[in-house]
Amino acid sequence: MASKELEGEEFDVVVLGTGLEESIVASEAAAAGHKVLHVDRNPYYGGDYACFSLAMFIEWATRHRDIRQVPTVQISVGSQPADAPAFVIDRTVDQTGDIDGGAPQLLARFATDNAADALQALDGLLADERKYGIELAPKLALCRGELIESLLDCGLGEYVQFRGVESNYLVYSDKTAERIPDSKEDIFASTTLSLVEKRKLMKLMTAIADDEQFAQLLDEHAGARFDEMLRGKFRLSGKLLDAVQYAVARVGYGESVSARDGCERVRRYAASIGRFGRMAYLCGLYGGGSEAAQSFCRLCAVSGGTYILGERVASVEPTPTGAAVALEHGTVRAKRVVMSPQYAACAEPRARLSRAVCILGDPSLGADTTALASYVDGGVVSMLYVTQSTMAAPAGQAVLYAWTEGALAQRRSMLASAIAATIKTAPLLFTAFMEVCELDAGTAQSSQVIVTGAPDASVGLDSAVVSAQQIFSAHFSTLKQNEAVV
């Protein structure tokens, strides 16, 4: 593109960032007839949901990440202890002077005293680096959730491939992993549940599934907490209570959830089972969030949207009629700007998530399977186990993701314990720990400049879809009509 080729161009909507939320808004706006420019400063699609090969993940960590959002990435290779990483990436290469070379050369700039044999071990992994799919924000799709409905409604179902999540586990510090029964048949066939526990669980599932009983349940426990209802009405306790709260309703540890909200979560989970098979969740091939975002980008392009990747964004300034966006190739004007908080110069880090991604030398939970797990021990760690079945790892290996709310300094040991309890004796080939901050855009938000959210701690993609739909409904669905009135 020639220098300043975009200077003076006008658009109805400029979207900055190609994460899932931004991509849905862009596709909806273009389909509604708005003139859309969709820009990403990075040379790849997906934003916070991007999926990388192993070498590209290292390049992201050392070159492309926003250090306000991800202050450090700590990498261990082989069996190094989690608290003694071989590489501590606390800045980016662009801030320290550009260098040539691949992933090993990039990482060498951040080596610690523990890196003696790490680079040699890393070379072995990089030989198959394109066979890995490392997601920045690993998430799933409920079979009857908002993402699946949106993909089907837009005709994008054939463009995103999924694999069913075959198992849902509850994991404890003693390394016991109990599979959560996903249907009435599973409950009856379970060998880990007692007869009394089966009756309690069946009573709950029947009440949740039946419309009349469900409405009565909500009326009886209006104002009550979900855990209080489970203990009082259904007499759940111990691991059975943990299973319903943490593995099915996905309640965060210490999160106060109303009986209504908790019951609706269980109902959505139960309703999802059977739609595409005996599972509640689907896992995207090649990275679910990334592939979904790219499918919406394709839809936007088909509807006339313009795309530019690797475009530097200098500033976003409100104007009386919208906003001016200063790009590398010229300043454009838009009636509305939708942007990831990473594009707000004033954004400050707030809430934190601690994440870990591990490459396992042995597929400990199965060589051709996908599993969701919840580790419970003074907190809850969500985990996702993927293999070659979702194009996440070479044959004979697996990738395990683990994440929990809170700062890494306080959550690292919990993540390490969760990983150890889940993988048992499987060797660790590669581990990356990182703290991911939610960026508060503060004063950057206005009626003309709309700031999207970041991936949350949930395991599902539906919250991003709902947020994008709310943004479009509030800011764009009546834009053309308002212009006509003027």
Image: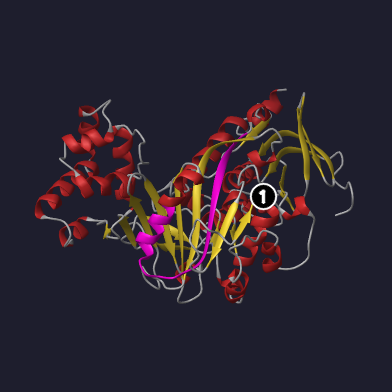
Report how many numbered discs are placed on residues in the image.
1
Q: Quadrant of the N terminus?
A: bottom right
Compared to 284, does 243 lie above or below?
A: above
Q: Provide the residue span drawn in magenta.
A: 415-440
**Is residue 87 among the parts visible in the rendering?**
yes
The percent position of residue 4, horizontal first and vertical second, equals 89, 46
Residue at the (56%, 33%) spot, across then down: 473
Quarter of the image where one finds residue 386? bottom left
The percent position of residue 20, horizontal first and vertical second, equals 57, 48
Please state if 87 lies on the left or on the right of 160 as rendered: right
Q: Is residue 387 magenta?
A: no
Residue at the (42%, 62%) spot, across then down: 385
Q: Nearer the viewer, residue 106 or 461?
A: 106
Is the residue marked by circle 1 packed among few (<14), some (14-19), or many (20+) residues within 10 Å?
A: many
SS category of the residue bearing label 1: loop
Q: Pick out the residue farthest to the right.
A: 3
Q: Pick out the residue farthest to the front.
A: 113
Q: Is residue 425 magenta?
A: yes
Please state if 254 lies on the left or on the right of 94 as rendered: left
Residue at the (70%, 60%) spot, across then down: 109
The percent position of residue 62, horizontal first and vertical second, equals 68, 56
Q: Nearer the viewer, residue 215 or 480?
A: 215
Q: Nearer the viewer, residue 11 or 319?
A: 319
Residue type marked 1 = Ser
Q: Which residue is mark 1?
A: 303
